[in-house]
Amino acid sequence: MRMRSLLYVPGSSPRFLERAHERGADAIIVDLEDAVAANEKDAARAALGRSVAMVGRGGAQIIVRINTHDVPAMLADAAAACEAGAQALYIPKVSSPDVLHRLDAHLRPLEEAANRQAMRFAPLIEDPAGLLNAASIAAGPRVFALSAGSEDLATSMGAQPTPEVLRVPKLMIHYAAKAAGVLSFGLLRSTADYADRQALAAAIAEAKDFGFDGATCIHPSVVPLLNEGFSPSPEEIERARRLIDAADQADQAGIGAFTFEGKFVDRPIVTRARALLARAAG
């Protein structure tokens, strides 16, 4: 399933949870971590059964961002998300694969007892240790995607979350995801400022060019920008179809590289065109 847009919704806010399914996001992240006050975390966890069902009414993938600040809270959040029927966990502040193995061992008997599908993991890398361990984290159990936590990552380095500061760390995490064959979420800048739509659209286009698969957002107004920006345009789809037709004809004629609409084409370009059509098909 495509995950172009992942909308964060506070797990303690019924007002936002009730309308989340109307926003058109491919995935909804019910947040038990940063968006929930410390004195509301237990209540947000206890409400997951209702929250997950509520936000999933539109068919989006449901992910729960758990707390990892202490082990009991982490395991309780993961168990509650499993029982509620969420498809995946967003796991913040992952510095090594150890936490993934701990969660995997914790969830396996719960999933077997409930006769449910195994949950998947999306580690969120938010410090230099996690950055340097990104490849081993990407290869950890159940991982289907990697993402960088812009604000926390910059803070952990004593830096400001400017595009210049974030670019190299985010690309390192992106390359680790691609090397492991998992999804890569993010933009090469912080998404905290969602009001500048022109800059946001440009950042989405840049991320798409780099091969990112989608991105998270904290405001529903960003969802349409992500869905459009991470989808092939009609013009791209039509050109890819023409190119593949030309490649098929070249293959039948025993020709490898060829010229298409004034440009040189060889196998990697054809492979990209086929991948584009696969993404367009969902």
Image (spheres, grey):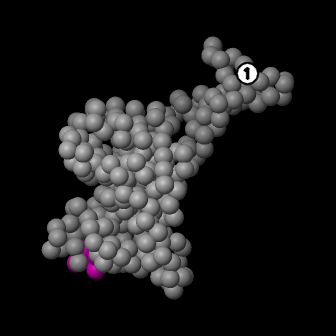
> Would you call the spot at circle 1 few (<14 residues within 10 Å), some (14-19), or many (20 or more)?
some
Tell whether 247 sits left or right of 282.
Answer: right
Q: Position of residue 64 (x, y in %)?
A: 36, 66
Q: Is residue 229 visible?
A: no
User: Which segment is the magenta one?
Assistant: 43-48
Q: Pinpoint residue 20: horizontal percent, then vertical percent.
A: 31, 61
Vertical placement of residue 41 versus 191, above or below? below
Residue 267 percent across, percent down from the top left: 69, 29
Q: Is residue 213 toward the left or the right of residue 197 in the image?
A: right
Image point (36%, 36%), residue name: 168
* The furthest residue to the bottom: 113
| Amino acid residing under circle 1 | Ala
Residue of label 1 = 257
| 66 or 226: nearer the viewer | 66
Secondary structure character of the magenta stretch overall? helix
Which residue does the image show at 62% across and 16% down from the upper left? 263
Q: Which sits in the foreground, 256 or 62?
A: 256
Question: Residue 227 location in percent, x, y?
Answer: 41, 45
Callout 1: SS: loop
Residue at figure coordinates x 21%, y 41% from the top left: 159
How many numbered discs?
Answer: 1
Q: Which of the pair 152/17 is nearer the observer?
A: 152
Image position of 71 with respect to 246: above or below: below
Q: Is residue 244 visible?
A: yes
Magenta-span inclusion, residue 206:
no
Instruction: Name the residue at 84% across, 25% down.
Output: 254
> Can you name the residue that lies furthest to the top here?
262
